[in-house]
Amino acid sequence: MKTKLVLGAVAAAIAVFSQGAFAQASSPTRAEVKAEAKKGSLAPAGEGPIASQPSKMSDKTRDERKATTKADRASGALKPAGEAADMKDGQAGKGSTTDRAARKADTKAAVKARTTQPAGEAPQPSAEAPKK
């Protein structure tokens, strides 16, 4: 029984040490890695660029971009930023197209005709008239 235990321990120790030796033998030395990095043939760490996508880098300097923006602003060709950029010049926002006075007049007429829903009550189907 003791010999099996000793043989098992020896086999485990050999497996642990030989794994480290094999891993070390297959990897390049630090000097080799530094030499490759100096040449530029070593890829940088992390994800590499995907060949099918175009570069997102601008071909202009910051000063050139600023000058172009300034010229566009002066000529009026600069698009507005934010949510207003998608709207056309004559297009209204999300609000109503009627003015406040017209809305108030419509509501007052609906209250007089008793076609509005009383406050605090559940809505009724449109075919039914509100109860008096």
Image: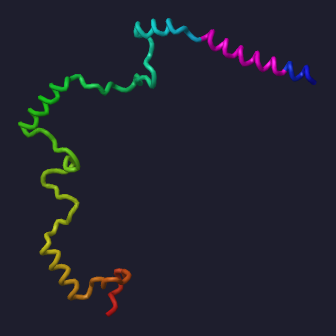
Q: Is residue 94 magenta?
A: no
Residue placed most toward the observer, 113 or 20: 20
Image quarter of residue 56:
top left
Q: How many marks?
A: 0
**Residue 31 higher or lower than 70, as above or below:** above
Horizontally, is 47 left or right of 59 in the view? Answer: right
The percent coordinates of residue 53 (x first, y second) are: 37, 26
The percent coordinates of residue 81 (x first, y second) are: 19, 44
Horizontally, is 55 left or right of 33 in the view? Answer: left
The percent coordinates of residue 13 (x first, y second) are: 76, 18
**Residue 19 higher or lower than 53, as above or below:** above
Q: Residue at x 67, y 12 (%)?
A: 21
Q: Residue at x 63, y 9 (%)?
A: 25
**Residue 30 higher or lower than 63, as above or below:** above
Horizontally, is 121 left or right of 113 in the view? Answer: right
The region drawn magenta spans 8-26
Image quarter of residue 58:
top left
The C terminus, quarter of image = bottom left
Residue placed most toward the observer, 117 or 1: 1
Return the residue found at the far right.
1
